[in-house]
Image (cartoon, rainbow, N blue to C red):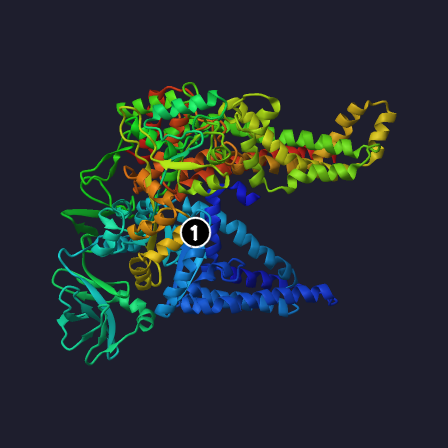
Amino acid sequence: MQSSVDVREAARASAPVRPRREITTAFLVSRIAVLAVAAAILVYAVPPLIAAGSWVSLALLCAATAAIASLYLTRRFIPAKYLIPGTVFLIAFQVFPVVYTVTTAFTNFGDGHRGDKAAAITAIETGSVRQAPGSPEYGLTVALRGEELVFLLVDPATKQVSLGTSKGLTPLAGAEVGVTGKVLRAPGLTVLKAPEAAARAQQVSALAVPTGSGVIKANGLSRAVEGRATLVYDAACDCVRGNGDTWTADEDQGYFVNAKGEHLAQGWQVGVGLDNFARVLTDPTISGYFVGVLGWNVVFALGSVLGTFALGMSMALTLHHPRMRGTRFYRIALILPYAMPSFAMLLVWRDMFNRDFGLINQLLGANVDWLGEPMTARFGVILVNLWLGFPYMFLVTTGALQAIPRELTEAASIDGATPWKAFRRVTLPLLLVALTPLLISSFAYNFNNFNAIALTTDGGPFPAESPQVGSTDLLITYTFRLAFGAGGAQFGFAAAISVFIFTIVAVVSAVAFRRTRKQEEVYA
Amino acid sequence: MRMRALGTAAFATLAFAATACGNSQPASPAAPSASASAPAATTAGNLVIWADPSRVKPLKPFADQFGTENGVTVEVKEISKDNQQTFLTASQQGSGPDIMIGAHDWIGNLVQNGAIDPVTLTEEQKGAFSEKAIQAVTFNGQIYGAPYAVENIALIRNTKLAPEAPATIEDMIDKGKELKKAGKVKEVLCIPVGQKGDAFHVYPIFASGGGALFGATSTGDPDPKQVLLDAPDSVKAFEKLKALGEKGDGALRTSITNENYIVNFASGKCAYLVSGPWAISEVKKGGISYDITAVPAFKDGKPATPFVGVQSFFVASKGKNKALAQEFVANYVTNKDVAKALYEADPRPPALTAALQEVQATDPDAIKFMDAGKEGMPMPAIPEMAAIWEPFGIAETAVVKGGDAAKAAAAAQKAIDGALKN
């Protein structure tokens, strides 16, 4: 698909007169690198694709490689040379996940509904195979009759040897049985040794020896058991029969359901239309708490952004002051939290907030149940996020400050402005023009800051009346619990929620960006 | 960063996207990772086993031996995170292993996703395991895994501080409070609660107080249609937990968490620890003289039955070499030496009676844990169990902090029933 796009792009790109250009080293190296990577992927992926018989993938792979080769080996299609790598990454890492998430939202994909119907039927039938009552557990030896794989079955009690083929079971005379119960020699047959049998393991599993009451199948390579599937799928009625009951396929639910409304455990993936979206909107455990969680979510995201920005900016302004000494040392010290893995630091913070064993209470000599009370827990997570986030704001503000000429503030002070006024009226607006897009993306990031909550409070503390929603739950942690906590993994439902959250964040960001543009018009 | 912000749902999506690209867009950079496992999985005579880090090393020599005996190569691959989900996702895509190692309570979920096949054990093989182990790996009347280790929690006691094993919970609390008053310990009891509760560890005490999770079906399996958390007996049990909590005896405290409870015991901050075999190495490091007994029951209470978990080998139903996998699981790892080697790497009592007897000669702890779990209840393997843990734990935390027991039980019941659509 992608290669056809390439060709079209390329065709359009080739139309204008191509400028002559010099061949620089960088140009040569980058060209060789791209071709080498494409060739390497081709060489690496072809054998497994052939082995797996994925001819469509193979054709696509070859076509894509050919397209890349023609693109970078010829002197034409210059814009495409730059566009293609970006497009590939865009499709692979942005477009595909989004499309996949949205399509998943319309299915019931999740635990119990992972595979297709055929897989569910196989699982139901294999899972229902019971050993035939009173049947022996045969000792198994695999042998060849000509080219045909056969079983030599030894009854452990009588030491009687039988020959099992896909036609049935016949007694076999003249076989020599060893002490372990394995057949050593049999007339007219080639007895396979363990490695030879193992090499044919797939044939061994496939062979079923029919008997009156079921089939004898290998159980490993040294034993065979007579069993019978107690549940059997009947294509005529699209149902599963057995155990005195009938389960009919329900394509809306992706389950086999009986008259009592009970279903078999194994289901399959079906499209459920807008069900997942409807569930998000109508489920009382979601709609009942939605406003509260959204409110706190906005407070958390705003608190995190404004807090980190205020702190980071003050630090940057302090270090930017011309009379400040030892700025390099301070800068390194301030970057430190940024350099630590936030994953580990969040867990460390959680333990520091522990009432009886935590560092904070020990230092303060207090006995506050930080993460056990709603308000302190909320304060705690914002504090942790502040600590983790301010170095980033410090960095970007430092960068933006370098771009603001000092003459501007000096001119302001000559005009009689106080330092505060100069900052309010001159520096801050100029900073904001540069930083607002970053603040918005930081807001969007913190709006969905799963780690900050999941690793410190995990949504808690939870009021006794509502174990589903905790005081510090963000939309993302709260819905993660709904989608992956109680009912096993429900990817379809989770995807629907993701779409909703994406919509909220997109709307907030769009509005904010629109306002920024107006601001830019004023100051730029 | 942006990826992370989309949440875990998107993570899963991404994982799929990466592998799906392997099929539809072979030129994309994601292709190699998707096809990397393909050659291994498609070659006949190659067995792939997935195990968690602590079991990879002890399993390796036996896997190699099995490989040599059968003329195949056996690869033992380490999976360290979200093993069950990783296995399910991989096996759905056909890049999963032939054999998976995991806890028996996964069985229900693995079966409903069609990820594992039943394992046929002979009567003789079944007889070689402890009855509880076989009971645990049986689901819907079928055995779905070969058990190799049995684990349950017990009461680990600092014998210097508390020389006598307590007969009842009341005795234990009294002794703990006495020691605390005398300044010898800081906590009455080390049992993890945390801000979200810990249903697994508190369950024996809850059961002794008369509490129950599920009713039983006609076949004696737990019945997810009958959740009993809100039943009068369970409410009474929650009240007993409340009496042990922060406003009562102070034996259950939210500040004792899964991260600090073993450390606290190992550093002598409490005389009693409720934990499993995994705690022993840490306790030994702390130089504590200890003894292991069953978690005591309330005076006039029901038995304090811990959950019993059984580590097992599963045959993946989408594996490429099922005959070999069956051979390995049913006829090879039921071998005593394998059980012992796994025990030595990670000292949890072997499920194989013969291996347990040999192990107990050098390590008395194994049999003590086993004895402590005698009355235990195999953890329900039904997929619905997933709905229990969190609401139960949150109700526990609520009462431990002094909340109303009836209200907490009712809310937990409602949440669970809602999740199970009862």
Residue found 26% across the figure and 65% down from its top: A222
Where the C terminus of chain A falls, by quadrant?
A: top right
| Residue annotated with mark 1 | B345
Give the x, y percent position of residue A508.
56, 33
Q: Quadrant of residue A119?
A: bottom left
Q: Quadrant of residue B109?
A: top left
The residue furthest right is: A414
Nearer-the-camera pick, A351 or B4: A351
- Whole-percent x, y for residue B138 in the image: 26, 47
- Graded by Cα atoms within 10 Å as few (under 14), some (14 to 19) or many (20 or more), the crowding at tag 1 reads some
Q: Above or below — where is B173 with respect to A187?
A: above
The residue shown at (22%, 36%) is B216
Relative placement, left or right, of A521 versus A143 is right
Q: Amino acid at mark 1?
A: Ala
- Residue B208: horizontal and vertical position, in percent? 30, 28
Residue A16 vertical position relative to residue A316 in the rendered view, above or below: below
Viewer-side residue, A68 vs B64: B64
